[in-house]
Image (spheres, helix red, strand yellow):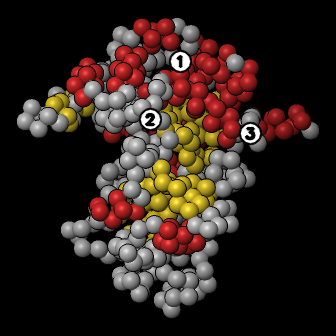
Amino acid sequence: MSKRPLIPDASSSTTCASRPTHILKASHEQPFVERSTSLQRAAYSSACPHSGTTTLPASTERSVPVCFRISDIPLEWDCQRTLNFLAENCSTEHATTCQLSLYPSTTGRSQVGILELTGPRDYINAFAPLSHDNPKRLVTSRDHQVTIDRHFYGLTPLNTISSEVIADVVAITGLSGHAYESWRHRESSKMWLKDFLPDDLKRRARIMTFGYNTSLTTPSMTTAGMVDFVLDLIQQLKAARQSAINRSLILVGHNLGCIIITKALLICKLLKQYKHLLKATRLLVFFGAPHHGLRTKELEEMVDDLQLPGSDRFRELLMQIRENSKYLEEHAHVLGDIWRDRKIISLHELHPSPTVKKDLETGRWGRDGESLLMVQNVSSLLFLPNEERISVASNHSEMTKFLTRSDTTYGKLVGYMEEALDLCSIELKDRKNVCI
């Protein structure tokens, strides 16, 4: 099988006035985009020294990029070296558009890459053959190895921090969600946490996303449940903040992610070793929070019908977050102090969402059922004096995605985040003055 570099060789004679002919330097703030018009020659766009163009027949190209996370990239590697390593060790027999963004890992000991590929489906699958039985691929050479996955479980960094960073922003996805795709708009392919927020917060925040396995339609042998997800989040946050335990924290949740946030803060309140996380939390942002449950009737029917491995775990999880759930009722009674001591932004959906329904001819389940409001306002809103409420003209799934940064809901959200960062900055200065 022939192997083709994903980017042109550094010695290529094809140059651009805005780009020096020596090897490209890594750009951590702007992704490297490469497009190839042939196997021998690549053209670069003059708009940006780290961008270019790729062409593929329209009939074979996927319009929505497929995202991969690449972990354990050495700190000294730039985008070009990373892509060359992948080209040498992965199946790259077909031309494709690729966009790579490199960010420091949460520990700072390596880099994490977000690779977006557009191309024929067969090529995408061949590049990193992954499945629920084999969710990660270890790519090795004589001197190095990196890990490729598409599930984005755990913490994933989405920007490069600067000396001005005063807060961590962490987004936790919801039930059957994806830590990257659940925040990315399908039409523009923009992921606002990565593509908009770093600059709009004036690079004052480190931004990360957190993922966990709650897929209801994928066989699973794990027994992980709510408590496991909560503890995983807490422990990963603690590890990621070892060098800055007092840095302010902004937590963003969607759907089940909101419940995981509140449960995590309760545990941080009870356990001494995690209290610094609770103290650091300044702002809570809830998208469609099911504080008093969400509609799960159709999802429960689907889980019962599919009878996949792990269905008992799925069923238990749905019972915990369904409407009129005793679990959530008991949960709500002990949250008074958590709510009172920090600012809350509650976003609630205005449009209904299609429910899941089984096709009687094919036996397959799809979102072809009746459209209903997944989370009622009485559940998603807390009606507290320190709560700002934002209505979103979208359904439950689409409310977390923004086409452009001019989206009015996004603009409101950024405004509240900036206010929180301003207060964090004042507190930080006061703390430094006291130390002096």
- Are there few (<14), some (14-19), or many (20+) residues within 10 Å of tag 3? few
Instruction: Name the secondary structure under disc 3.
Output: loop
Q: How many callouts does the rendering have?
A: 3
**Which label number is shown at residue 304?**
none
Task: Give the residue displayed 65% in from the left and 62% down from the top.
Answer: 74
Q: Which residue is mark 1?
A: 385
Residue 337: x %, y % from top left: 62, 14
Amino acid carrying label 3: it is: Gln
Based on the displayed image, in which of its 4 quarters is residue 293 positioned? top left
**Above or below — where is 340 with respect to 409?**
above
- The outermost residue toward the right is 436
- Residue 195 relative to residue 372: left or right: right
Q: Which residue is mark 2?
A: 213
Amino acid carrying label 2: it is: Asn
Residue 111: x %, y % from top left: 62, 57
* CA distance separating discs 1 and 3: 34 Å
Instruction: Name the secondary structure under disc 1.
Output: loop
Mark 1 or 3 closer to N-term?
A: 3
**Above or below — where is 167 with respect to 380?**
below
* CA distance separating discs 3 and 2: 26 Å
Front residue of 349/36: it is 36
Q: Which residue is mark 3?
A: 242
Q: Nearer the viewer, mark 2 or mark 1?
A: 2
Task: Give the residue displayed 70% in from the left and 53% down from the top.
Answer: 109
Q: Is residue 153 visible?
A: yes
- What quarter of the picture does the C terminus occupy? top right
Mark 3 or 2 closer to N-term?
A: 2
Residue 148: x %, y % from top left: 49, 55
